[in-house]
Amino acid sequence: MYPDVVDVAAIPVPSEFSEDEVMIVVSALHGRELFPMDLFRFLESRMAHFMLPSYIRVMPELPKTPTQKIRKDLLRAEGITADTWFRGDHGIEVRRKKHKA
């Protein structure tokens, strides 16, 4: 787990070029700040290329049900917002890595 992350939800968002893209929405421990680029770099070395998020949104807290389940339906309905980080805006292209034998 990435340091300072309290909650995370992965949701699909529509892509104009292919199938849905992956977006993660995260919240930080109280008083901490999360930087999407740092989080992406952390994930990049730990996840398969097709699982890496194209979008990262940091929220103070994620919406939850009375039983504390994350309301992904609300996050999907909001989709990409003005405060959502997009890896393409930072010149990041994700490609499949070839494994050495």
Image: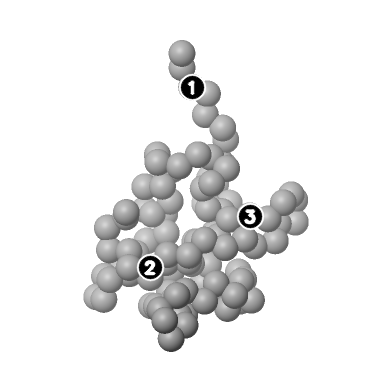
Q: Which residue is mark 2?
A: 7
The residue positioned farthest toward the top in the image shown: 101
Nearer to us in this view, 47 or 54: 47
Instruction: Please report the residue visible at 52 percent of the width from the left and 76 percent of the height from the top.
Output: 71
What's under tag 3, amino acid-wise?
A: Glu
In the image, residue 75 sits, relative to residue 18, either above or below, namely below
Callout 3: helix, strand or loop?
strand
In the image, residue 96 sits, relative to residue 53, either above or below, namely above
| Res 89 seen here | no
Residue 36 image position (x, y, % from top left): 42, 59
Q: Which mark is residue 72?
A: none
Nearer to us in this view, 81 or 61: 61
Q: Earlier in the sequence, mark 2 or mark 1?
A: 2
Instruction: Please report the residue visible at 41 percent of the width from the left and 47 percent of the height from the top.
Output: 43
Q: Which residue is mark 3?
A: 21
Instruction: Please report the residue visible at 51 percent of the width from the left and 48 percent of the height from the top.
Output: 52
What's under tag 1, amino acid-wise?
A: His
Q: Which residue is mark 1?
A: 99
Residue 34 image position (x, y, % from top left): 34, 64
Image quarter hosting the N terminus: bottom left
Give the distance between the C-alpha atoms of the residues marked 1 and 3, in whole angstroms: 24 Å
Is 21 left, or right, of 58 in this rendering?
right
Circle 2 Cα neighbour tier, 10 Å, few/some/many (<14 / 14–19 / ≥20): some
